[in-house]
Image: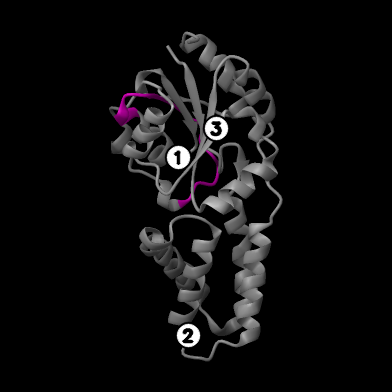
Amino acid sequence: MITVIGFDADDTLWDYEIIYHRARPKIAKILGGGFDLEPFFSQLDQAEIRNIPLYGYGIKSYALSLIETVARLTDQPITGGTLLELVELIRQMLSSELEINPYAGETLAKLSASYPLILITKGEPYEQENKVERSGLSGYFETVEIVSHKTTEAYRQILKRHGVAPENFLMVGNSLKSDILPVIALGGKAVHIPHHQTWFHEQVDETETEAVEFGQLEHLGQLPGYIELSFDIG
């Protein structure tokens, strides 16, 4: 029996990774011809991973890793103009219009009529709160939980706060690493809805999912029907 449904936000309810992909040619233009771009972006990816324990997730964290990578890969002075252009790009990324999943509103409206919904997202609190507010979807959720990392323990604490037994909880998201495997390990249920652009840090080896049971759908619009057929309403 399912009594509460949790939803991921980024790349589940709205596109997010695309903001970073769209920033890359703009970064290349700002940096000009002084950088070999392929190793530059490889180094940037590595810097992001290295800095997650310190900076967490999000565009502000990305900005710090970007500045670090620029400084590491050039022996030339970095002009104030270049830095200002990079800062302006980060501002644009932070204020980018969210591309809402076309099925999000209808799906959340249907499910919120029968279940309490919890939005569970990771990242810098202000940045995530801002996106949730701008999405226009916050009204469907009884509460919003923002965590630094989506671990099994993080989910355990969320469910404990809300008095939800893991076996009565269903999590929906695009990331096997963050939305599916930690919840299954806790004893909950999960539905994976892949996104066409998933951050490399969120990818897992196929062997990690071989013995794990979870639902998988092509798109968010299929979720109400799947839940109706698969679970009892609490």
Label 2 residue SS: loop
Looking at the image, which is closer to me, 214 or 86? 86
The percent position of residue 221, horizontal first and vertical second, equals: 62, 24
Residue 91 as seen in the image, left or right of residue 77: right
Q: Quadrant of residue 45?
A: bottom left
Instruction: Give the image's coloring scheme.
Output: one colour
Q: Which residue is mark 1?
A: 175
Q: Quadrant of residue 47?
A: bottom left
Q: Do the numbered discs 1 and 3 sit on residues whose CB atoms are within 8 Å? A: no
Mark 1 or mark 3: whose residue is earlier in sequence: 3
**Residue 143, disc:** 3
Residue 185 magenta-drawn?
A: yes
Q: Is residue 202 visible?
A: yes
Amino acid type shown at disc 2 = Thr
The percent position of residue 191, horizontal first and vertical second, equals: 46, 26
- Residue lying at 45% horizontally and 23% vertically, measured from the top left: 170
In front: label 3 or label 2: 3
Residue 228 as seen in the image, left or right of residue 104: left
Q: Which residues are magenta?
A: 184-199
Amino acid type shown at disc 1 = Ser
- Residue lying at 46% horizontally and 68% vertically, measured from the top left: 44
